Amino acid sequence: MSELQAQVRDVLTRRNSAEARALLEHLLRYVDQRVLAVWRYHCVDLVGSGERDEVVAAVMETLLIDGLARFRGETIRELLAYVRVVTDRALLHQARRRLRERRVLDGQRLEWGARCSGPEELVEQVPDVPLSEQDQDWLRRLLAAGSMAEHARREQVSRAAVTLRVQRIRGRIEALSRRDQDSVEAWLTEQAHVVASR
């Protein structure tokens, strides 16, 4: 059993502790952001906005009952990836149920969407963040540094170079759709929480 697995199980046995509350609040924010990102990307017309809270609650219940106890990873990143799978499956289940209901009511097969032939493809169609790997890596390092000045020192570049790179990335983000901008914002928030937890 990895150290993280032991910590997670310890948290589950002491749910009223400060550590348990901190972990569960962190996971709740992550689940809520993931559900919102997937819903905005491809479920707006299928799953009602009010049902998003139901999905989030169902995921947290699953995690508390036995989901976290079945986690076998060794890092926070693996834990979040595991939670993401649980979250995506819960949203897919809700989407399939609504799709079946519509088919019954309409008496015909409904199309899932122009880019998606069925709910099974939904997860693969939703990127974690619509930024290039280079931009993601650079932003992670910037967040880890804590400031542009410290990042410039670590990267051995001028502050002006860091500022220019931030402006370029900001420009690329502003050119994205509102939905993709929300995905970037959710990703940045999550990365900031990961950095803070370290």
Image (spheres, rainbow, N blue to C red):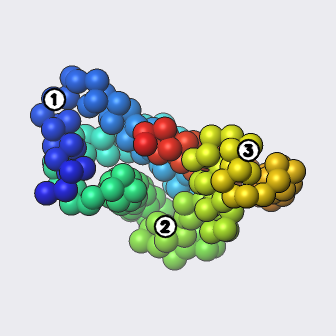
> Which element is circle 3 on?
helix
- Indicate which disc residue 14 carries: 1
Of the pair 83 and 165, the residue shown nearer to us: 165
Mark 2: few/some/many CA within 10 Å (<14, 14-19, 20+): many
At horizontal 71% and vertical 50% (from top left) the residue drawn is 153
Quadrant for residue 11, please give it: top left
Q: CA distance from mark 2 to mark 3?
A: 37 Å
Q: Amino acid at mark 3?
A: Met
Residue placed under numbered mark 3 in the picture: 148
Cβ atoms at labels 3 and 1 below 8 Å apart: no
Of the pair 90 and 107, the residue shown nearer to us: 90
> Which element is circle 2 on?
helix
Which numbered mark, 2 or 3, is in the foreground of this view?
Answer: 3
Q: Is residue 159 left or right of residue 48?
A: right
Q: CA distance from mark 3 to mark 1?
A: 39 Å
At horizontal 48% and vertical 62% (from top left) the residue drawn is 106
Cβ atoms at labels 1 and 2 below 8 Å apart: no
- Indicate which disc residue 29 carries: none
Cβ atoms at labels 2 and 3 below 8 Å apart: no
Q: Quadrant of the N terminus?
A: bottom left
Q: Is residue 111 left or right of residue 198?
A: right
- Indicate which disc residue 122 carries: 2
